[in-house]
């Protein structure tokens, strides 16, 4: 178990409930949660989440702009620790990968977050 000295930004890992995530891993996990949550599914925050789910079953070329807009808007609204500078979408036969590039607000470092939905 790791003891942290800065307890402001951390959360339990969704991959390992005995581990915690911090720093960029915390932001990455938050982005994943935001993009995979359907608005209205969290009763205490009914507007939390993104509309990305609306476009996952449609041809990518016809909805690429809508997915990028839904992802960047949701991240800008719910995750203030990163400023999105670019967003790209790729799709395999069964999965959609959203790649977010941005600047970490507290440190001005560049980060790339890849999320598969």
Image: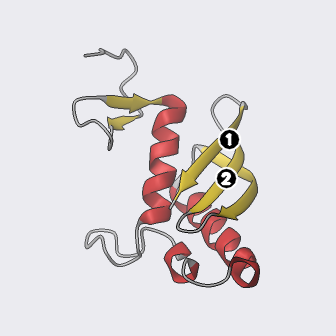
Q: Quadrant of the N terminus?
A: top left
Front residue of 15 and 43: 15
- Secondary structure under badge 2? strand
| Res. 19 image quadrant | top left
Q: Which residue is mark 2?
A: 99
- Residue at point 42% right, 74% down? 47
Q: Residues within 10 Å of mark 1 (few under 14, many from 20)?
A: some
Q: Is residue 67 left or right of residue 57?
A: right
Give the mark, 2 or 1, whose residue is nearer the N terminus: 2
> What x and y, as percent, mark residue 72?
65, 63
Q: Residues within 10 Å of mark 2 (few under 14, many from 20)?
A: some
Which residue is located at x 34 percent, y 37 percent? 11
In the rendering, at what x and y percent does residue 56 appear? 55, 77
Q: CA distance from mark 2 to mark 1?
A: 7 Å
Task: In the rendered structure, find residue 112 and report the number of the disc placed on it.
Answer: 1
State the residue at coordinates (34%, 69%): 45
Q: Is residue 4 left or right of residue 109?
A: left
Within the image, what quadrant is residue 68 found in? bottom right
Marker disc for residue 98:
none
Disc 1, SS: strand
Looking at this view, name the residue that lies furthest to the left.
18
Residue 62 sits above or below residue 101 on the image: below
Depth check: 57 or 37 in front?
Answer: 57
Q: Decide: marks 2, 1 in contact (CB < 8 A)? A: yes
* 16 or 41, nearer to the observer: 16
Query: What is the residue that sits farthest to the front in this orientation?
Result: 93
């Amino acid at each position: 178990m790791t003891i942290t000295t800065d307890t402001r930004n951390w959360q339990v890992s969704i991959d390992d409930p005995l581990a915690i995530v911090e720093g960029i891993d915390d932001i990455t996990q938050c982005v994943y949660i935001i993009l995979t949550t359907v608005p209205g599914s969290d009763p205490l925050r009914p507007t939390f989440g993104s509309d990305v789910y609306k476009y996952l079953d449609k041809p990518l070329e016809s909805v690429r702009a809508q997915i990028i807009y839904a992802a960047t808007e949701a991240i800008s609204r719910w995750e203030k620790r990163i400023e999105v500078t670019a967003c790209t979408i790729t799709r395999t036969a069964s999965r959609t990968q959203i790649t977010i590039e941005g600047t970490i607000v507290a440190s001005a470092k560049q980060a790339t977050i890849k999320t598969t939905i």
